[in-house]
Image (cartoon, rainbow, N blue to C red):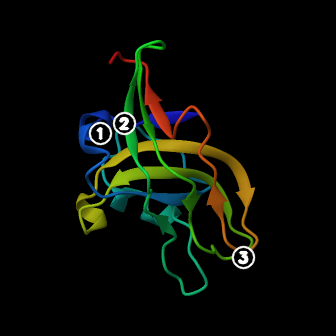
Amino acid sequence: MTIFYNTGLDLMADWVTQDYKLALLDDTYVEDRTQQYLSEVLPYELLDLTVDYIRCTPTGKTRTADVFLNRIVYDCDLLGFGAPTGGQIAGSMVLFKWTGDAIDSPMIANIDLGDVVMTGGLFAVVVNSAGLIYTDQGV
């Protein structure tokens, strides 16, 4: 399931042209719609072997009006996250608009992954045919 943070959808109009990223969050993170900035979830971010954050910049971004289902679809290519340290458990990934600093990078949505145990190898998420996220709030 995907939840949107309270200010998230207001920022999606420039999805195709601006710098958005995704971060993997561990399975102990509990979604809180009132959170606003990436800095609020840093303790839950997965790390690689160099103790650096695992983040992904989506490529091939599109924003499409689906008039048949009355929604806007935000889509992108396969998401490649690099190699998180083995044994960590990814519970979700957070979509955020990157400003250059976690303290003022607003979060858009939290996308549930289930619980995926990292192996230490490269980790990728295949974006399904319905898109990365979509809104049912009209087009």
Q: Secondary structure at mark 1?
A: helix
Q: Depth-wise, is mark 3 or mark 2 nearer the camera?
A: 2
Q: Quarter of the image holding residue 28?
A: bottom right
**Residue 120 marker:** 3
Q: x, y (%) of residue 3?
A: 48, 34
**Residue 126 marker:** none
Q: Secondary structure at mark 2?
A: strand
Q: Is residue 3 left or right of residue 92?
A: left
Q: Earlier in the sequence, mark 1 or mark 3?
A: 1
Q: Which residue is mark 1?
A: 12
Q: Amino acid at mark 2?
A: Arg
Eyeballing the image, is 51 above or below 5?
A: below
Q: Quarter of the image holding residue 38?
A: bottom left
Q: Depth-wise, is mark 1 or mark 3 nearer the camera?
A: 1
Q: Which residue is mark 2?
A: 63
Residue in the image at 52% along x and 36% along y:
131
